[in-house]
Amino acid sequence: MRTLSIRFRLTVWYFCFFALAGFLLSVASWLLLEQSLDTLTLHELHERIDDLESLLAAQAPDANLDALRAELMREYRSRDEGKWLQLLDGQGNWLYYSSRSRVADGIAPLSQAPATVVPFQEATGHHLRAYSRELQAHGHSYRVSMAISADSSALILDQFRRDLLFLVPMVLLAAAVVGHLLSRKALAPVAAIISEVRRINERNLSTRLLVVPTQDEISLLSETLNQMLERIDAAFRSVRSLTANTSHELRTPLSLIRTRVEVALCFPRTADHYRSVLEEVQAETLRMTSLIESLLALARYDAGATQPELEPVEVTSLMARTAREWTPTAERLSLDLQMIPAHKPAWVLGHAESLNRAIRALVENACRYTPSGGWIRLHAQDTERGTVTLSVEDSGIGIAEHDLHRIFERFYRAQQPQHEEQAGSGLGLSLAKWIVDQHKGSISVESTPGAGSRFHISLPAYIAAEVDKGGVRDPQALPG
């Protein structure tokens, strides 16, 4: 089933609104006109009866029926003026009746609720408004019934009805036209936003929509789209940066491998020379493998494909194992790498392999930026605040203050490494931060240029008394 467009639905809503408003206005106008005519008629009847009451009060208290009849005939017969009148005394004797019997067949009996208007009555093709009331004069009771011709009121109402029937189609047509125009006017800002958004592509993602200061849905839509464009722009910049940096990082080892192999193949070489070339090729291959593994890990993390199972992990043993792994590298670089013993084992709920990767990234970074003769210290402790802090401290070259907020960005390298053979890809710290974030922790750095750096990883502690040691994964069993 095809969904109706917003413009069509708005037009229908506006049409219904104006049509309903026109209908209610017509009904209200009809009722007000009818009420006004009734009020005028009732007012005339009241005046007539008040005049009759004054006439009766002006008569002598002992006036007989014939005298009253003669006075009433003389007074009202000549100025009937379209009114029908009947007057009876308390014994039912008539005192006066109108000569307009040709207009009405009779007036309704005296109303049970005096001073009320009787609805229209039609007699011989005419419309009447009748009214009945009791009068008191000189201690005598009289019953008066009066009617007035409502033909003029009926004619006015009929003419008003015809006018309404003529105006209603025009009002409906005007409602449809106005509804269409209003819907176009209401959707004009949306159409302008659509036109502007269609001009934005991957080459001009920095373009932003104009936000009008009206604080309404249109401005909110513009702000939301601008925020979305900022995220898309950031994602595109990240992809471009990743592509450019990856190409650069892979081009260097590949060029080196190609050069070494081409030189080795130019002339016959000794076995030792070929062995040296193969070792260099192997080193560059390992470097590319590490880079590709880091890129794949970050890609999996970004895509949410990596959902490791969390389990209790003793990070003290994990850091001790990392220290043993990197001791040969540290000795080759003339660095003193030590693991500071902890007072008690520290436990966290996490993924051992991922945490090991994060710690290795920090140790690798320390080895790379610490000059020969320096030292590196690893420490893990369980704090009283319910967190476990993993620290990697070195006596390296340190990090400048303006670089501290960027060292966790991908491919960012603040300083030149102190050991060229340890030049990295700039992905280690960003990967470590991502792993720590996945463990609901935080990573920070304290550094003084020329005096060294200290990285801290804070993770929620896992109470050691609750650890099922039989089900804990042994950090020593991790692959190298």
Image (cartoon, grey):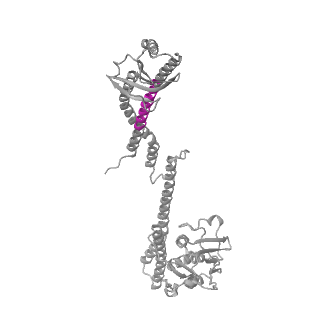
- Name the foreground residue: 363 vs 53: 53
- Name the foreground residue: 139 vs 389: 139
- Name the foreground residue: 25 vs 383: 25
Q: Position of residue 277 (x, y in %)?
A: 47, 79
Q: In this rendering, would 462 be left or right of 307?
A: right
Q: Position of residue 209 (x, y in %)?
A: 50, 48
Q: Position of residue 23 (x, y in %)?
A: 40, 35
Q: In this rendering, would 222 be left or right of 10?
A: right
Q: Is residue 456 magenta?
A: no
Q: Reply above or below: 119 against 340.
A: above
Write down the quadrant of residue 390 in the picture.
bottom right
Q: Let me know if residue 379 appears in the view.
A: no
Q: Is residue 31 magenta?
A: yes
- How many numbered dots are placed on residues in this image? 0
Q: Position of residue 404 (x, y in %)?
A: 62, 67
Q: Reply above or below: 424 against 218.
A: below
Q: Please identify the residue farthest to the bottom as the structure is shown.
A: 470
- Name the foreground residue: 136 vs 309: 136
Query: Main SS of the magenta segment?
Result: helix
Which residue is located at x 51 percent, y 50 percent?
220
In magenta, the rendered stretch is 19-41
Q: Let me know if residue 66 appears in the view.
A: yes
Q: Reply above or below: 32 against 435.
A: above
